[in-house]
Image (tube, rainbow, N blue to C red):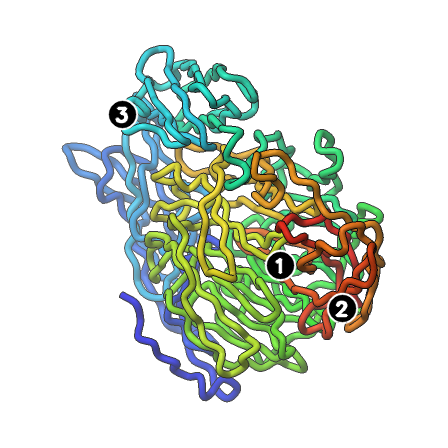
């Protein structure tokens, strides 16, 4: 049930602290939907009991705790699950405990019951002991067969059959039929899938079960894919059409990517850097040379860190992974794009895992939330200062969700727009001060996304509903707020997407519209979609408030996927997995989307307006000249900050529409943003868009 729309404690934001003992796991957390605005100390005296059992089990295993005290054995006999050993333990109230299940030989862990948050490992369960709790590990006998499911991608049609027989699936306009598209095969069975496109379609790509790595059939009318039934598998078969690109855009066939792209950044020289877990080094990729990849050493494990660009274009990475979920590290690191080298920064006061970094008007970086070195929520914001030291906002203690949606606002304060329905302004000067903002209409948007689509104007979209102990179904709704209204700013509804999505990415496009890609429509933390309709991108127009369904991608992009606007106006979508949802695999691919604005009405690539020359650096309020042979046709100039995205939120994503005038046959005069509150110092993509809506390739410009 949604909590009442209370603003309890808002009148005492700077005066008193309110006890909070709700805790949750990282970006996978079950968001606190009723957290009071200000948080103080936790009691170290109260105790809560954790009781574990095997209720519902049909097989056996053991359960242990990372904090000691639990060593419980589950057995099954006579139709009853029994337990023995140490199955109950008292801990200080507020402790976050990780339980680890180990099935006995011939058994598997079927499910957990009673976890307060999901874990990256399916064998683990995280329990926040805000009160005494009971948790059950459900063990089952190892399966003798696994399900194979065929789903459609892209927009074309065709048929998929299997050998041995069992799959006889018809895909129509990108959607798999209701019969013949799922069956079970014995564990270890080798299966070969054969796909044949219908007239007017072609087989673009496969995805899932390792088929994507082979790229079988890409660009042709038919092809095969061989797989082994080592687990349940979902295979997406993408038949596509050429003729729909003018209205729906198109996705290129997937390309192999050296690592799961969990964190993705557009560097000031136009290259892209991604990284994931420590099993692979960070990846460097140049869109101008798409077949080659570079790498760089990683100084610390900054999986699940926060990141944003400094005014000089260096990437500041704060926090990361200690090796234990929820437990952050204190380090900060700089990446210099001009040397491809990392250098250490000063340590923060406390650790952070799943924090948000936000570039402020001052050029400083605000870092909020995250899991600290004690596996608890880090309540105290810190500010990286231009001298390289960290300033602690000791007067601004506040419980925030992991990876909160934070933006530099037009009045100089930072604004927290989600992901729960409590929103806030933060004065980050001195020791900091919070002010309560307006409530949004959805209690939580767990793994929703957010963009600043114009100066001071924010949209939040999608995400999963949540309570203190479970993740509910995602929403397709979106809301907007105009911070330029100051204290009178309120959240207003805008159009809803065609499909509900959690773990989506919202990406600003070159013309000012917003692209939503990926995500799952299923209930739960990391669950494969129940419909292949979620493969379709959607585009929101801020002028009309409406969403348009676009072309389908080939791969499901779920937990740990990212999307990024490239300087040529295309969108890179990459990653997903580590861990993958059941039936899917960790995704070592990327796909590139061409929005409809890149095409003529007949589906051919449009001739683009060109920026012949522009300055590499401008000052606030400066009028500067952009040379273009298309001066008279320019209808808008857009200014988009370089992206730095992870976990469904681009921490540096914001946009301005710049005023301009035609100053000659081959030039326009553009006005830079007036203040740093409207566009924090750093590097931006400048696009010019012609009267047809076609954007140029961007010029990357620094403002300071």
- Regarding residue 373, the answer to whether it shows in the image is no
Q: Is residue 682 left or right of residue 257?
A: right
Residue pictured at 42% horizontal, 19% vertical: 198
Residue 533 against residue 98 in the figure, above or below: above
Q: Which element is circle 1 on? A: loop
Camera-side mark, 1 or 2: 2
In percent of width and height, residue 86 lies at 32, 49
Q: Which residue is mark 1?
A: 653
Of callouts 2 and 3, the N-terminal one? 3
Camera-side mark, 2 or 3: 2
Residue pictured at 59% horizontal, 54% vertical: 508
Q: Which mark is residue 671?
A: 2
Q: Which element is circle 3 on? A: loop
Q: Nearer the viewer, residue 283 or 492?
A: 492
Residue 114 against residue 35 in the figure, above or below: above
Real-space CA distance between mark 1 and mark 3, rounded to the nearest whole angstrom? 43 Å
Q: Which residue is mark 3?
A: 179
Mark 3 closeness class: few <14, some 14–19, many ≥20 residues within 10 Å = few
Residue pictured at 40% horizontal, 31% vertical: 173
Q: Nearer the viewer, residue 73 or 542?
A: 542
Q: Is residue 533 left or right of residue 339?
A: left
Real-space CA distance between mark 1 and mark 2, rounded to the nearest whole angstrom? 20 Å
Q: Nearer the viewer, residue 564 or 111?
A: 564
Of callouts 1 and 2, the N-terminal one? 1
Quadrant in which the N terminus is drawn: bottom left
């Amino acid at each position: 049930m949604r909590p009442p729309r209370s603003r309890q404690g808002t009148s005492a934001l700077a005066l008193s602290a309110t006890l909070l003992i709700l805790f949750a796991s990282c970006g996978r957390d079950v968001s606190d939907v009723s957290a009071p605005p200000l948080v103080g100390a936790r009691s170290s005296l109260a105790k809560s009991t954790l009781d574990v059992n095997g209720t519902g089990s049909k097989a056996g295993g053991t359960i242990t705790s990372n904090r000691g005290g639990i060593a419980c054995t589950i057995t099954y006999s006579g139709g009853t699950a029994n337990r023995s050993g140490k199955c109950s333990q008292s801990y200080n109230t507020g402790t976050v405990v990780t339980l680890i299940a180990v099935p006995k030989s011939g058994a598997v862990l079927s499910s957990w019951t009673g976890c307060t948050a999901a874990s990256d490992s399916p064998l683990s369960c995280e329990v926040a002991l805000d009160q005494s709790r009971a948790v059950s590990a459900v063990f089952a006998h190892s399966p003798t067969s696994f399900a194979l499911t065929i789903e459609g991608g892209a927009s074309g049609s065709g048929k998929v059959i299997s050998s041995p027989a069992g799959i006889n699936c018809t895909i129509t306009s990108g959607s798999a039929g209701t019969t013949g598209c799922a069956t079970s095969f014995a564990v270890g069975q080798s299966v070969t899938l054969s796909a044949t496109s219908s007239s007017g379609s072609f087989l673009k790509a496969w995805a899932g079960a390792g088929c994507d790595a082979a790229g079988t059939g890409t660009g042709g009318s038919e092809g095969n894919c061989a797989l082994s039934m080592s687990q349940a598998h979902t295979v997406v078969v993408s038949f596509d059409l050429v003729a729909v690109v003018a209205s729906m855009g198109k996705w290129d066939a997937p390309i192999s990517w050296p690592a799961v792209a969990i964190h993705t950044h557009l560097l000031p020289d136009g290259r892209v850097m991604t990284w994931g877990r420590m099993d692979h080094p960070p990846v460097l990729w140049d869109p101008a040379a798409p077949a080659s990849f570079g790498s760089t050493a990683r100084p610390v494990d900054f999986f699940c860190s926060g990141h944003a660009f400094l005014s000089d274009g260096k990437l500041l990475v704060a926090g990361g992974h200690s090796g234990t979920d929820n437990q952050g590290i204190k380090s900060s690191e700089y990446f210099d794009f001009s040397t491809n080298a990392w250098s250490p920064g000063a340590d923060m006061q406390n650790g952070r895992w799943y924090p948000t970094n936000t570039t402020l008007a001052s050029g400083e970086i605000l870092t909020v939330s995250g899991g600290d070195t004690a596996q608890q929520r880090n309540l105290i914001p810190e500010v990286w200062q231009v001298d390289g030291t960290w300033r602690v906002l000791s007067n601004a203690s506040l419980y925030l969700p992991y990876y909160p949606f934070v933006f530099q606002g037009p009045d100089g304060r930072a604004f927290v727009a989600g992901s729960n329905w409590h929103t806030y302004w933060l004065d980050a000067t001195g020791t900091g001060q919070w002010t309560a903002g307006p409530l949004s209409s959805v209690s939580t948007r767990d793994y929703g996304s957010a963009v600043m689509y114009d100066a001071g104007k924010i949209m939040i979209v999608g995400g999963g509903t949540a309570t203190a102990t479970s993740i509910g179904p995602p929403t397709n709704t979106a809301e907007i707020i105009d911070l330029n209204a100051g204290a009178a700013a309120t959240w207003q509804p805008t159009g809803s997407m065609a499909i509900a999505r959690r773990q989506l990415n919202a990406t600003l496009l070159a013309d000012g519209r917003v692209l939503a890609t990926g995500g799952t429509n299923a209930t739960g933390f990391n669950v494969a979609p129940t419909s292949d309709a979620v493969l379709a991108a959607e585009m929101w127009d801020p002028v009309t408030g409406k969403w348009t369904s676009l072309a389908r991608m080939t791969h499901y992009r779920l937990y740990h996927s990212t999307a990024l606007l490239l300087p040529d106006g295309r969108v890179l979508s990459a990653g997903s997995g580590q861990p993958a949802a059941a039936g899917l695999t960790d995704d070592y691919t990327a796909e590139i989307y061409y929005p409809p604005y890149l095409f003529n009405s007949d589906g051919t690539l449009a001739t683009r307006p060109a920026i012949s020359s522009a300055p590499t650096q401008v000052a606030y309020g400066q009028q500067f000249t952009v040379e273009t042979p298309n001066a008279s046709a320019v209808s808008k100039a857009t200014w988009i900050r370089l992206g730095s995205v992870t976990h469904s939120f681009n921490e540096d994503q914001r946009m301005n529409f710049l005023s301009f005038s035609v100053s000659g046959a081959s030039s326009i005069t553009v006005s830079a943003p007036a203040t740093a509150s409207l566009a924090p110092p750093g590097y931006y993509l400048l696009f010019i868009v012609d009267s047809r809506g076609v954007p140029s390739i961007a010029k990357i410009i620094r403002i300071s």
